[in-house]
Image (cartoon, rainbow, N blue to C red):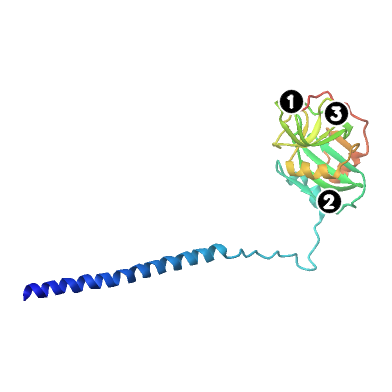
């Protein structure tokens, strides 16, 4: 009798396990499916863009001339660009001050930009004088210094002195060219034309107005420095 009872108990236990195993597998599969669906929904959820906040109506306009005059507050590699300050048409002139390591840009006699620069280091002095833009090349490379990149190059002399994008230090650092921050060089490249006037001076104008006065004088310059 005990043997029969023990046998029946084992049979019932095995039967229950057999019955509950498929249910356990179904629950596990259902849980995994729910998790996969949740992940898929999270991935497919569209990105919500933050709205653009416009300036409040009636806010005070930017004092562009004052910003452009404050060139002494710029750190190496920084610049300001405000083309809206001048009419879209008009001749563009550039003034580079070697003592200040600054460049001003004028269009139609109105300042539209100011930037820090790096001119020629000792032994590779950047020449002074008044120059014309002779050639423009977006992706120029040096033929003298290991094919070094000179992006947004604007040639001032045929022996290699140019304006171009590059690393702007806190002091003269080039081989004779006038290096500009790359962003400023790109913007400047977009507003100049061949024949544009560039004045490189040993003077230190204290304002954009004084720099503009320098842009109207001087004879055509001739360079003796090597280019980058």
State which tag comes first along the sequence, 3 or 2.
2
Label 1 near label 2: C-beta < 8 Å?
Answer: no
Secondary structure at badge 2 equals helix
Q: Is residue 206 visible?
A: no
Name the residue rendered at 28%, 72% in the picture.
Answer: 19
In three-dimensional space, the C-alpha distance between marks 3 and 2, rounded to whole angstroms, equals 27 Å
Q: Residue 136 appears at what percent x and percent y?
A: 83, 36
Q: Which residue is mark 3?
A: 157
Name the residue rendered at 91%, 36% in the picture.
Answer: 195
What is the crowding at mark 3: few (fewer than 14 residues within 10 Å), some, or many (at least 20)? Answer: many
Q: Which residue is mark 1?
A: 122
Secondary structure at badge 3 equals loop
Q: Is residue 40 left or right of residue 111?
A: left
Q: Is residue 150 left or right of residue 21?
A: right
In three-dimensional space, the C-alpha distance between marks 2 and 1, rounded to whole angstroms, equals 34 Å
Residue that lies at the very extreme toward the left in this rendered image: 1
Q: Residue 187 appears at what percent x and percent y?
A: 79, 45
Q: Quadrant of the C terminus?
A: top right
Which corner quadrant of the image does residue 134 belong to? top right
Q: Residue 179 appears at what percent x and percent y?
A: 75, 35
Secondary structure at badge 1 equals loop
State which tag comes first along the sequence, 2 or 1.
2
Which corner quadrant of the image does residue 143 belong to? top right
Tell me: residue 36, above or below residue 130: below
Instruction: Report the number of numbered marks.
Output: 3
Q: Is residue 51 visible?
A: yes
Q: Which residue is mark 2?
A: 83
């Amino acid at each position: 009798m005990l043997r029969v009872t023990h046998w029946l108990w084992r049979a019932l236990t095995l039967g229950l396990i057999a019955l509950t195993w498929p249910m356990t597998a179904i629950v596990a599969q259902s849980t995994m499916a729910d998790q996969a669906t949740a992940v898929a929904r999270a991935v497919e959820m569209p990105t919500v863009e933050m709205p653009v906040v416009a300036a409040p109506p009636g806010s005070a306009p930017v004092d562009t001339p004052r910003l452009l005059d404050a060139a002494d507050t710029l750190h190496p590699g920084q610049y300001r660009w405000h083309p809206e300050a001048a009419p879209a048409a008009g001749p563009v002139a550039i003034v580079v001050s070697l003592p200040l390591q600054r460049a001003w840009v004028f269009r139609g006699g109105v300042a539209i930009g100011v930037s820090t620069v790096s001119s020629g280091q000792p032994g590779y002095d950047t020449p002074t004088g008044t120059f014309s833009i002779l050639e423009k090349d977006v992706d120029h490379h040096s033929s003298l210094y290991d094919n070094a990149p000179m992006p947004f190059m604007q040639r001032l002399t045929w022996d290699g002195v140019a304006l171009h994008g590059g690393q702007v230090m806190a002091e003269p650092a080039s081989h004779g060219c006038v290096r500009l921050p790359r962003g400023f060089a790109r913007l400047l490249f977009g507003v100049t034309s061949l024949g544009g006037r560039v004045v490189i001076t040993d003077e230190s104008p204290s304002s954009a107005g004084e720099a503009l006065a320098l842009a109207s004088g001087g004879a055509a310059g001739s360079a003796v420095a090597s280019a980058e």
